Structures are given as structure tokens and as C-alpha cells.
Amino acid sequence: MKLNLGCGGTWPEGYTNVDALAACKPDVLLDLFRFPWPWEDNSIEEIICSHVLEHIPHQIEGLSVDGLVGWMNECWRVLKPGGLLHASWPHHQSDSAFMDPTHTRYIVPATFNYFNRLWRHQNVGVEYAGARCDFSYEGRGARLFAAREYVNALSQEEKDKIVARQWNVVFDMQGVLCAHKPVREP
């Protein structure tokens, strides 16, 4: 089974589309900020979450950890070993990250380090902030603002400098996380 969590108006073929809003016409109507979800452990091959992570509340009823930590733990619980989580979120240096009043956080690729057991063990402690999951992260790119298409013609080094120094060059980020089960031992 494959899930499209927080589907909104996007229903990719082959996925079970899940949303809390009936107006989105999901296959499954579900509050994704209430745990546990109705899927069994290790039952999901793949998850898509497009522009969901930035909406996760910091405090979720019944959780003693930050909402994003709880959400990532829950994704890891339902994913099969080697299961993939495809995520996209607004770039932290774009107006789109700030303009929506329902955004609760800003995500940078390094955020996903905290969901990697080996990185946590080496850098901040084994069970930092209640993370029990173990994901490896691979960045999959950035979608540029149309007004900044000239950036495509530049070398990667030049692109990196522009993205680091200018606002609204990158619209959103995309990445894939792979669930490691059982958790890796350092």
C-alpha cells in the first residue's frame, strides 16, 4: 500500500489519498495529527507528503514530544523496512514559507538529521527529543521560482552561492527518506 498524506487536491494513481478535510475528497478522511494511525506496523511501501510537514503543530494532544518528531515516528512505524517517504516543503528563504499563517515551522535539509539514528548517536544523543525512528535522507532538488530561471544555466557552485544569499530563488525543496528497520546500531 502507498499513502498520499495530506493529499489536498492531488490524487496520484496507485496511492491511498488521506486528508482531514472532506472537501479534498480523500479516500480516507483522517486527522493526521492524531496517533496512532489506522495502518499496521510495517505495512506501507511508500508515503508522499507534499507541503504537510510545515503544518504539523509543535504540540499535539497525547504526545510528549514535538509534533514533527511524533509524526516522523509514526511514518517510520507504518513504513516497511526500506520504505520511502517522499517529502516536499517550502524553502526557508522564500515568501511561501512565511506567507501561510498555518505554517508552524521552517524545514531545512539538516532537519532530517534528527531522524537518523546514527547521526543522533554521534551528535546529540541516542534518543534526542523522543525520536525513535531511523531514516536516511537524500535531497532530490529544488523548484526554482520562474523569475529566477537564469539560475539553471549556472554551475552548481554558483547556484549554491545564489541560493544561500538571495531571497525567493528557490520555491520549495524535495527529498526522500528511507526507513531503516530495525534501527541501525552505531
Image: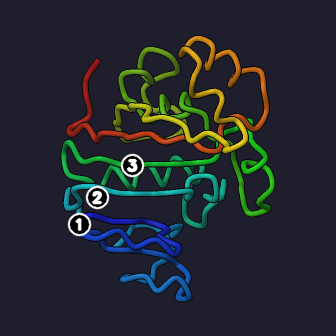
Q: How many marks?
A: 3
Q: Quadrant of residue 14?
A: bottom left
Point 52% across, 82% down: residue? 24
Point 50% across, 57% down: residue? 50
Callout 3 amino acid: His
Rate crowding at label 3 as few (under 14), some (14 to 19) or many (20 or more) other CA atoms within 10 Å.
many
Contact between marks 2 and 3 (CB within 8 A): the answer is no
Point 52% across, 88% down: residue? 22
* In the image: residue 144, left or right of residue 97: left
Contact between marks 1 and 3 (CB within 8 A): the answer is no
Q: Identify the image quadrant of the N terminus.
A: bottom left
What residue is shown with label 3? Answer: 86
Foreground residue among 28 and 126: 28
Distance CA(mark 1)–CA(mark 3)? 20 Å
Callout 2 amino acid: Val
Foreground residue among 119 and 9: 9
